[in-house]
Amino acid sequence: MHRRLADLEAAQLRRQVQPLLSQGMLLTDALGNQLVNFGSNDYLGFGSQPLTLSETGLDRREATGPSDQGVALENTIRRGSGASGLVCGYSRFHDELASRLATLEETEAAALYPSGYAACSGSVTALAQRGDLILSDALNHASLIDGCRLSKAERFVYPHGDADAVEALLRNHRRRFANAWIVTDSIFSMDGTLASLQRLVEIADAHDATLVVDEAHATGVLGDDGSGLCAALGLKTRVPIRIGTLSKAIGSQGGFVVGPQVVIDYLLNHSRPLIYSTAATPASVTAALASLRSISQDPRPREQVRQHSQRVRAGLRQMGFSTPELDSLEATIPIVPVRLGDASAALRAATMLRAHGCYVPAIRPPTVPPGTSRLRISLSAAHSEAQIDQLLAGLRQLRR
């Protein structure tokens, strides 16, 4: 272990956690330096806000009934859920959250997981069985990759975004398998690129395959209702199983899967991370309820973060960086990568931006392929125009 850690150190790939105090869009490091946070996935700014029970939209008298496990009469939240959801950890708050997620996603039901990672890995592993085929995008999130690897199904990893490769694989191999599953992120977390969902839907229909889409970075950000890329493209009814997280735009913690009732019932009986994990805490569930209510009632935060993304991308284009066309949907995504090549270049750039008062993480292998180390700028509706100005000024220093 010492030798392997030393090798990582020499390659500038060793990772370490650092204590940071977060307040709004500001971070304070261990030395007392204050930095504007451009590393968080809190796209709508909900995660940095205080929470009161009234924001959830629940009737307080009903919520504080004698059988509820979430709230005491003085309007405080119980610390833990105490058990797996299938034992006694599933409160009426959990049930309300599942119901609201199913309504938002226009599906029959939803299953709640303790994390987005568990939702991705646990659902794919449970759904795809021996004798099935999984086709997985090369740049899928690690949680989807692990779910595919843990499954007993046969797996093909297709080149990133290559719908033609998916079609060819199904044309050549589909008849050998009982079921076929196409698994993809909707927004790819390190690139901010979009899956070719329209093509994938058509291919799935033509070859009797089931499309499973992880909307982790799209939920709350895209679509007129804030439910993600499937909504933005008018494909919600054609993508039967969708996965999401409560820890990004929703600003809480946990994950979910939405789909037909039979799929959710199946996961409740076969998905080990769901069955054997303690249920999400009442505090995180009520925070998610408050955010879902805000998403349904107020489109301004998602419009704000889209405008921030377009402004930052326009600035990068002026500096000579390559970014999507500004009239494209991709240009509104709050994940803005700045590719710099090797790990040392990315670390130097992150250090320069830190000196300019901006926290932008350097992303290195194995999170991204070798030679593609980058800055990953993550934007939030809670960023002020002055903070965006500060970021752009810092980025200009990198070009000198």
Image (spheres, rainbow, N blue to C red):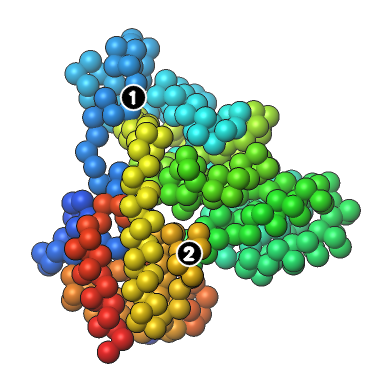
Foreground pick, 249 / 224: 224
- Image quarter hosting the N terminus: bottom left
* Front tag of 2 and 1: 2
Residue identifier under label 2? 327
Quadrant in the picture for residue 2:
bottom left
Q: Label 2 crowding class (10 Å Cα cut-off): few <14, some 14-19, many 20+?
A: few
Q: Is residue 260 above or below residue 11?
A: above
Q: Which amino acid, by three-letter code, is at mark 2?
A: Asp
Q: Looking at the image, is 34 positioned above or below residue 322?
A: above
Asked whether, in this view, residue 149 is left or right of residue 352, the answer is right
| Residue depicted at 62% across the width and 68% down the height | 160
Three-letter amino acid code at disc 1?
Gly
- Distance from label 2 to label 1 (Cα)? 36 Å
Q: Is residue 77 above or below residue 41?
A: above
Residue at horizontal 57%, vertical 56%?
A: 185
Q: Please state the horizontal and vertical placement of residue 145, each as a whole percent of the image.
A: 59, 58
Mark 1 lies on residue: 57
Among all residues in the image, which is located at the extreme top?
A: 66
